[in-house]
Structure formats: structure tokens, C-alpha cells
Amino acid sequence: MGTEAYLIVASLLFLIGASGFLLRRNLLVMFMSIELMLNGAALLFVTFARHWNRMDGQIFVFFIIALAAAEAAVGLSILIAIFRLKHRVNADELSELKG
């Protein structure tokens, strides 16, 4: 498979994630959309690292994986706390988080 196929798949992953984040108001779907965008970016880094025979992209992917794990842990704990208080996870109904 060529580099173009990987670029198309990574771009589609990122676009699906971005559209899910912008169009949906459920916080759980928004977190999953962020994960899709991070996976699309990680696939782009690996694709370009393979194309140019360098290891820089794969090092960035390790940072993306660590960021995704931290985001999932903190984000899901906040999501559980909000669900316990409100019994719903709609982003439009949350005004307490405004500064």
C-alpha cells in the first residue's frame, strides 16, 4: 500500500472526529471524537516517518498515546462527576463550568 492510502485513511479519521466533536453535544461522543482526531494525527506522523525513513514521527506518536491516556483518565472522571450531579451528559446544559 502506498503513502497516499495511509494519508486518506488518516484524513478521514481526523475529519470524522472533527465533525463528531462539532456536531454532537453528548460529552461521551465528544471525548470519542477527540480520540479519533488524535489517532488520525498519530497515523499521519507514522506515515510521514515511514515515507522519509526517520524515527521522529514515531516518537511523536508515543507522546500522542500518553496524551490520549491522560485525556481519557481526566476527562472520563470529570464526565462521571457531572453525570452523578446532573444525570445527563449534554454539553449545552452545563453552565457551571463557565468562568
Image (cartoon, rainbow, N blue to C red):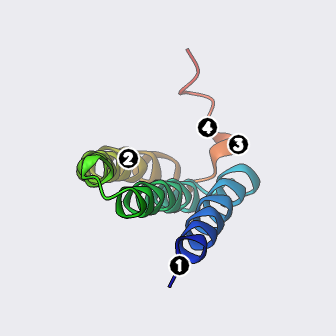
Q: Nearer the viewer, residue 94 or 26?
A: 26
At mark 3, the secondary structure is helix
Whether label 3 touches label 1, CB < 8 Å? no
- Mark 4 neighbour class, 10 Å CA radius: few under 14, some 14 to 19, many 20 or more: few
Whether label 2 touches label 3, CB < 8 Å? no
Q: Which of marks 2 and 4 is nearer the N terminus?
A: 2
- Three-letter amino acid code at the position of disc 3: Asp
Q: Which of marks 3 and 1 is nearer the N terminus?
A: 1
Asked where in the image residue 74 lies, by quadrant, the reply is top left
- Mark 3 = which residue? 92
- Mark 2 = which residue? 75
Eyeballing the image, is 9 above or below 70? Answer: below
- Mark 2 neighbour class, 10 Å CA radius: few under 14, some 14 to 19, many 20 or more: some
Q: Residue 33: where, in percent of width, then height?
A: 56, 59
Whether label 4 touches label 3, CB < 8 Å? yes
The label nearer to you, 1 versus 2, is 1
Question: Farthest bottom residue?
Answer: 1
- Mark 4 = which residue? 94
Q: Earlier in the sequence, mark 1 or mark 2?
A: 1
At mark 4, the secondary structure is loop
At mark 2, the secondary structure is helix
The label nearer to you, 3 versus 1, is 1
Q: Which of 26 and 47 is in front in this view?
A: 47
Q: Residue 38: where, in percent of width, then height?
A: 45, 54
- Three-letter amino acid code at the position of disc 2: Gly
For the residues labelled 1 and 2, the Cα–Cα distance comes to 36 Å
- Three-letter amino acid code at the position of disc 4: Leu
